[in-house]
Amino acid sequence: MTDILCASGLAKRYGALKVTDDLSLELKKGELHAVIGPNGAGKTTLIHQLAGEIAPDSGRITLRGRDITRMPVYRRALSGLGRSYQITSVFREFTVLENVMLAVQAGQGHSFRFWRRARGDESLARPARDALERVRLASAARRRTGTLAHGEMRQLEIAMALAMRPEVLLLDEPMAGMSRRETAGLVDLLRELKRAYSIVLVEHDMDAVFALADRISVLSYGRVIACGTPEEIRGNDEVRTAYLGDGND
């Protein structure tokens, strides 16, 4: 497998605080690469840097070999980077379908100036319905978004990312705040999506991480202290002691 997304030597400092410190990560085509670590390790800052929301002080990011280090967020999205957030960001007064249609319209490079007319545009509605079908939310298409349960909100946000036709998905703690049943459903969904997309997953739920990941990078104080398969990470004494428990129960 070849690297589709590559970050090398990323550094971000706020005064004396190093949030990312010579951080490197490679995502191979067709891979789900999970990033774990304690709060403050730099996980979300890494996602922000990959998405273009935070510019690194130094280092380089490439997508399919093309340098995107200074490329703005919207151009990265149009180039194939899809993104979800820790805090769900949707238009709660719109229907579920309308939220995804907005994402489709953005992915086509159009403005929302004529949104009232666009609401009836089947060229937007059709791919939006396809995205909702992909995340198992098609039955909720006509519901007002504010009525969705928390887990359904996360499914909607992933549908909006898929509507941008990405090659790479950047998922920042998609299981946060979910019940066990919701988490199990999302794990099952991501297991399907990883067949079609390359995914960087930041997540605190270790059961979900080990169920899904092809590779795992462990961050501590802005640096990668270990990277390997789930089996290799489970067998790493430093990682097991620091983050996963000592395994002696």
Image: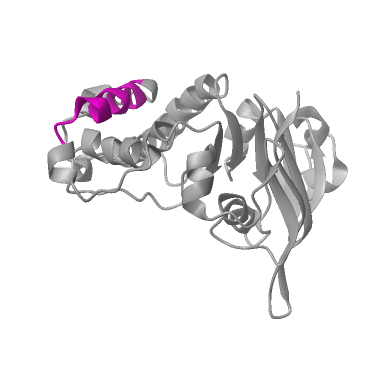
Q: Is residue 38 left or right of residue 85?
A: right
- The segment highlighted magenta reads 119-133
Q: Quadrant of residue 240?
A: top right
Q: Is residue 132 magenta?
A: yes
Left or right of 208? Residue 1 is right
Where residue 40 appears, x then y in whole percent? 64, 62
Q: Nearer the viewer, residue 206 or 53?
A: 53
In the rendered view, would you say 249 is above or below 221? Answer: above
Image-quadrant location for residue 154: top left
What's the image's color scheme?
one colour
Task: Residue 82: tell me if it is visible.
Answer: no
Left or right: 178, with 70 as reference point: left
Based on the picture, tell me whether residue 129 belongs to the magenta stretch: yes
Q: Say which quadrant the C terminus sits in.
A: top right
Residue sitting farthest toward the bottom: 15
Q: Is residue 123 visible?
A: yes
Q: Locate residue 71, reporting x and y percent.
A: 58, 54
Type of secondary structure dominating the magenta stretch: helix
Residue 34 position in % (x across, y down): 65, 38
Judged left or right of residue 134, residue 145 is: left
Question: Which residue is situated farthest in the right direction here?
Answer: 237
Give the residue at x 69% y 80%: 15
**Quarter holding the N terminus?**
top right
